[in-house]
Every structure is written in structure tokens, then in C-alpha cells.
Image (tube, helix red, strand yellow):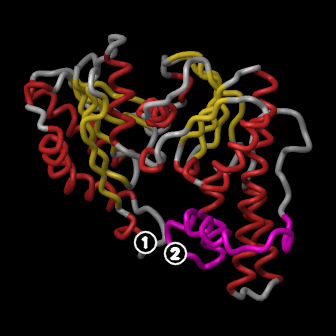
Amino acid sequence: MRILGIETSCDETGVAIYDSQQGLLAHALHTQIKLHAQYGGVVPELASRDHIRHLVPLIEQVLSQSKAALQSITAIAYTQGPGLIGALLVGAAFAKSLAYAWSIPALGVHHMEGHLLAPFLETEHPEFPFLALLVSGGHTQLIHVADIGSYIILGESLDDAAGEAFDKTAKLLGLAYPGGPLLAKLAEQGTPGKFHFPRPMLDRPGLDFSFSGLKTHALNIIQQTELTTQNKADIAYAFEDAIVDTLIKKTARAIKQTNLKSIVIAGGVGANKTLRSRMQEFATANNIKLYYPNFEFCTDNGAMIAYAGYERFKRGAVDANWEISVNPRWPLFAKD
């Protein structure tokens, strides 16, 4: 069984081929960072047009790299949601048109399920059940994962997601788009203890998050501080420290509540080196297994969609008709 995966939910065009026997055969990614950088954020219409320009070359690339014949593709999986509606429609229309032309099934998969399952692309991957910390630009969630399609949201952000807070604070510091990774890089030069940020919602029970207040706290500090290079680094350090500390302590609560012995970190913020390092310290100290995808599979990519499509397809999931429909606001727990 071979699944062609297509990811177009936001500003990354990803294509991959996953084989049930050989694993990931090939993947290719085009990022739109340069396109959107001049605007300081993603422009949805430009994102949609850029997906159209790059899907055909990327599909040709993965077919060539994998040496896979068109006739060997079993089905095409595409991101049906959540995401930017125009970008999703490009991927859905392309996937369904191609599947119709090739006389094979198409199936829409959940973008966040792709992130959840990305660690399964690695040689060492978790066994069910496990606790997932899903941290990205649009989502921050703690999820009890019992099996494919069996998800319980234990806690989630009530406002800004962790990645969103990173990007907004980076913009306040005058960093270029996308600011999150640049802020994390700047934090490496920061001085511990120079500034302090609150740990939101740790003073109350529960597993929900709230990161918008950290952005406001950062704004107050920035307005009262001379923004030298070192002060910027110190603010970045304190901000990142607060985010990571909050994520780890909430994860610890979830582990205590569920008695699970494995943690998966997924999503773009899962590539943050400080989060990985400190979560590993926590996991080692508590005899917990920690898993995360390779750095290239933390951000949006076609490989995770191809794998999620494979898991869904082998369980009988296919689109019922050739109607092109997407779900830009699609709760993960609605997928079963």
C-alpha cells in the first residue's frame, strides 16, 4: 500500500509518499517564509496561489525520488482541515482531481492528527496509549491518545497558542517573520534571572493554558526597558523560560492524572531545543519515555499527512464522493 500525502493547510506546501512495507519513500517541502516575510505574517490569498504553483513540481519530485510508478499509488491523502480555507481548497481540489484521473480513492485527514502521528515516522516510536503535548502556532493541547482516532482533549489554550505567543512577542522585540524560532535563538544569549515572567494558570487546578498575558507582560517590560541587544536577549530568555516551564508543569500534572508512561511532543514548537532538553530531564527523572518527530517533521509537512492517511485508509476511511469540501475549523475529537 502506498499513500501520496498532500499538505496545504497554511504556508507550507508538503508532498510525500508513504509505503506500508518500506516506510517513508520520499518527501518534499516548499516554504513560503520569504513570500510572507515582507507583510509580517501569512497572507491567505498569496498562500493559496503559491500552493497552486508548487504542487505539481513537488509531486513530480517525490515520484522521481521514490522511483514510484503512478500505478503503485493506492490512495491520495490530503489535509481537509483545520487551516486557511483557500489553502485547504487548493490541496483538496488537487488531490481529488488527481485521484479521479488515476482512478484511486482520496481521503481527507485531520492536520493535527498528522502532527500527533508524526513520531511514528521514526524508527523508535511510541506504543498506545500515550500523552501528547501538541504545541504549534495555532494549537496548544494536552491529549490522551488511546489509539488512532481515540483522542481525549485534557487541556488546551483558552487564547493564544504557545507558538502564537512566541511570534507576537518576537514582533514586539522587532524580530523578523517568522519570529518564534528567532526569539528562541536570541534566548540562547540571554541572562537567567534578569527578567521574570509569570507562569499562567499554574496557580489553579486543571490542564488548560493561557499565553496571551505573557505577550502583555512582555510589552510592559519592553516599554520600560532600553532595548539593547543584550536586554532583548534577556527578555527572550525569560519569555521562553516561562513558556517552557508552564508546558512542562502542565504535562507533569497530566501524567499524574492519567498515569501514562509515554509522552509525545508534536507540532512546530516541538522543535524548540529548550523545550526538548528540559522535557527530557523531566522524563528521565520520572522514568517516562519521551518521543518526538525529527526536526523536519515538527513543522507542517506532507510526510505526516501521508502517514495519517495510511493509518486511516487501512481502517477503511475514504471520501464518500468527489465533492470538494474542507473544514477550516475542525476539532480533533470530532474525528473518529
**Could you say where residue 228 lies in the image, as x and y percent from the top left?**
71, 88
> Could you tell me which residue is drawn at 74 percent across and 64 percent down?
239
Total tally of numbered discs in the picture: 2
Disc 1 target residue = 37
Q: Residue at x 70, y 70 (%)?
A: 236
Residue 48 is situated, as x and y percent measured from the top left of the image, at: 30, 54
Apparent side of residue 263 relative to residue 93 in the rendered image (left or right): right
Residue receiving disc 2: 176
Residue 170 lies in what quarter of the image? bottom right
As drawn, 185 above or below 198: below
Instruction: Tell me where residue 145 appears, x and y as whole percent.
Output: 59, 22
Amino acid of disc 2: Ala
In the displayed structure, does residue 129 sit left or right of residue 230?
left
Residue numbers of the magenta segment: 167-196
Q: Residue furthest right?
A: 203
Q: Is residue 304 visible?
A: yes
Question: Which label is found at residue 262?
Answer: none
Q: Which comes before the other along the chain, label 2 or label 1?
A: 1
